[in-house]
Amino acid sequence: MFENLTSRLSRVLDSIRGQGRLTEEQINAASRELRMALLEADVALPVIKDFIDKVKARALGVEITQSLTPGQEFLRVVQQELTATLGGTAEPLNLRTQPPAIILMAGLQGSGKTTSTGKLALWLKEREKKKVLVVSCDVYRPAAIEQLRIVAGNVGVDWFPSQVGQDPVAIAQDALAQARKQYADVLIVDTAGRTTVDEDMMKEIAALNAALTPIETLFVVDSMTGQDAAKTARAFADVLPLTGVILTKVDGDARGGAALSVRQVTGRPIKFLGVGEKSDRLEVFHPERIANRILGQGDVLSLIEETARKVDQEKAQKLADKLKKNKRFDLEDFREQMLQVQNMGSMQSLIEKLPGAQQIQAQLKNVDTEKQMRRTVAIINSMTRQERHFPDLIKAARKRRIAAGAGVEVQQVNQLLRQFEMTRDMMKKVASGGMAKLMRGLAG
Ligand code: GDP
């Protein structure tokens, strides 16, 4: 996500960060570099101009010239202005209405509307504990209706049937009646998209909007289309009272132009980011955190939240208690940890949020960590219980059997045992204090 932009901006800021004094010339040069980086990222021109003007005005003012650490101060100004460009503060989804809260999904075909409908349904169900009903008003493509049915089934929310040829407004009204009947908290209405903005589509969605008066009308847009994403959003915003934007396919977007342009071009906040094809790959959009990520400073807050949510809290607490009591850390605990990490989902998404993520990613480029973890778990599974508790008992003949059982080489069994020993030693050292506390912290 945003790799190219991050590496360009990091280079500019690194060259200025440590400076004890900043001359006007240096500030001008850095601003030029920033402008180039944003142009390359495909940010809309008025957005770039506004951003650079603000950074420059502040940089040339007392704020920086009189600071004791002007390089740091410059970075802070860039960070603040970037946050402002992205929308300032996070604008959460608004569900404060008489239930069911209606969410209307708008966007071009292929933008990720149906996928995002599923993601949002899952997010509402799991994170907000809402009862969700979804319906498709795409009466032109039977495949789209079917796709939503499957997605709803996968994420475990209710789906309201509709058919090709029906009137979209009538479908939506029937779905609303059903949502009321079954006391759903939220009704998400997926709509038809065309490949380009056209009048019929606009009329249809405007009619849906008028009939439903949704609390949220979200525009779904593909971030890979750069500043065009913002332009399309603007065209929709002119016709529909959009309340927010879901930016999709951000996982594949190295440039970041859409993310940076949408807010200013449309005046509407980005509310969510789609960061992968799977239904759980949806992130709430926090401008400040994204600004930090873009500047290569990581997003530790999101990382902690994500980790805490996905760790099995009961198991983490158990392990912390066990370590506190100075009990032995064995291969079953080790396996448990691996499984927990696997559970957290893609390592990629976790690594991306670490400060200095780009360097870490470069180092890990050829290492498939997820495959390695699966292999580790397979090796531990092919041991006996006794062996998992007392790995020192495992001799050469057994190593060969275990390797054969897990479909790996003996060398990999040895490697795992060494890795385990190192972890055990580390656990011993920190058991009394740090780690146990850390794990409790995550569990709490
Ligand atoms: P719709 O026509 O707007 O309903 O678009 P779909 O929901 O069918 O999505 C179009 C394609 O984009 C599908 O192949 C999705 O898997 C893919 N897609 C949607 N959102 C994301 C995302 O956040 N990341 C990635 N990598 N792919 C996505």
Image: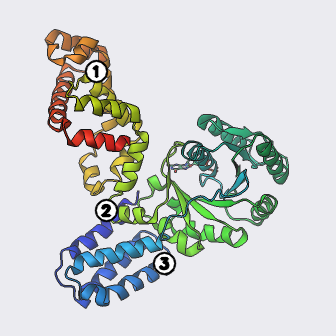
Seen in the picture, residue 90 relative to 279 is either above or below; the reply is below
What residue is rendered at 59% in x and 37% in y? 155
Instruction: Identify the residue position indicated by label 1 in the image.
Output: 379
List the residue tagged with mark 2.
296
Give whichever of 359, 333 is nearer the camera.
Answer: 333
| Picture layout, residue 69 above or below residue 111 | below
Amino acid type at mark 2:
Gly
199 left or right of 82?
right
Q: What residue is rendered at 20% in x and 79% in y? A: 69
Label 1 and label 2: CA atoms lie apart by: 37 Å
- Asked if disc 3 is less than 8 Å from ligand 1, the answer is no
Instruction: Point out which mark residue 47 bears.
Output: 3
User: Mark 1 belongs to which amino acid?
Assistant: Ile
First in sequence: mark 2 vs mark 3: 3
Residue type at numbered disc 3: Val
Quadrant housing residue 221: bottom right
Q: Residues within 10 Å of mark 2 (few under 14, many from 20)?
A: many
Displayed quadrant of residue 83: bottom left
Residue 241: x percent and y percent? 70, 68
Residue at 35%, 75% (x, y): give it.
78
Q: Position of residue 441 (x, y in %)?
A: 33, 44
Between label 2 and label 3, give the one nearer the viewer: 2
Q: Can residue 384 be seen in this view?
A: no
How crowded pointer 3 is (Cα within 10 Å; few <14, some 14-19, many 20+) is rated as some
Q: In which quarter of the image is residue 229?
A: bottom right
3D distance between C-alphas at marks 2 and 3:
21 Å
As measured in the structure, the alpha-carbon distance from the residue carrying label 3 to the one carrying label 1 is: 54 Å
Check whether the beta carbons of the residues at disc 3 and disc 1 lie within 8 A of each other. Answer: no
Residue 103 falls left or right of residue 290 = right
